[in-house]
Image (cartoon, rainbow, N blue to C red):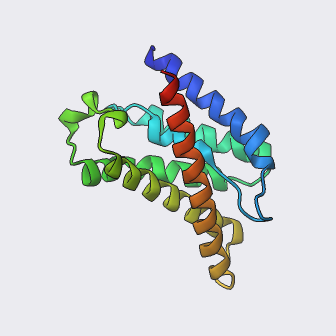
Amino acid sequence: MNKILYVTFLFFSLLFLQVFLLNNVLFLGFINPYVYVAFVIFYPLKKERFLFLFLSFLLGLSIDFFSDSGGINAFALLFIAYVRLFFIRVIFKKTEQDYLLFDLHQEPFGKVFNYVIILIVIHHFILFSLANFSTQNFTGVIVNTLYSSIFTSVLFFLGTYIIRKKK
């Protein structure tokens, strides 16, 4: 599939999935999945980062617009988009020369699992920290981060498995 079509489809499908379906899911009263993080995980690696950072910000801002959350999704998604290359270098031991040939689906599952979990936990911690914006409810931030990260990770890996199985 053409990379421009792939990125466009990924952007809009995750936006609609999050806004119209997953934002209405509140498991046990406080656990909400944020699967739109998959945009940062699946976006193709390139040397030009400006477009990727802009699209990540735009996706987060779009979700903030529909959920009236004041920019916290945009900041959290932009932050993990910015630090993504660091984790690819550390976890997968890739250099800039490897970026064009890098395919997440061809990497060992253990490394992919660590990469995905780290990005999801960082995103959720930033999101819930900004949502609460208080040190008095730090245990609530940790609990929400932990449970929502687990729920998001399960949905992410389940969805990835189902989509990869169809191909």
In depth, the one of 152 and 79 nearer the eye is 152
Tag count: 0
Q: Is residue 17 left or right of residue 159?
A: right
In depth, the one of 133 and 125 nearer the eye is 125
Q: Position of residue 128 (x, y in %)?
A: 64, 66
Query: Which residue is at the far top?
Result: 2
Identify the residue shown where x is 51% and y is 37%. 160
Q: Is residue 138 left or right of residue 120?
A: right
Q: Is residue 43 left or right of residue 73?
A: left
Identify the residue shown where x is 52% and y is 17%. 5
Q: Is residue 117 left or right of residue 10?
A: left
Q: Quadrant of residue 147?
A: bottom right
Q: Quadrant of residue 143?
A: bottom right
Q: Position of residue 159 (x, y in %)?
A: 57, 38
Identify the residue shown where x is 28% and y is 53%. 91
Q: Position of residue 164 (x, y in %)?
A: 48, 29
Asked whether residue 87 appears in the rendered view, the answer is yes
Viewport quadrant of the N terminus: top left
Identify the residue shown where x is 70% and y is 65%. 131
Q: Position of residue 61 (x, y in %)?
A: 66, 43
* Above or below, comparing residue 140 to residue 60 in the picture: below
Query: Which residue is at the far front?
Result: 165
Asked whether residue 37 appears in the rendered view, the answer is no
In depth, the one of 162 and 72 nearer the eye is 162
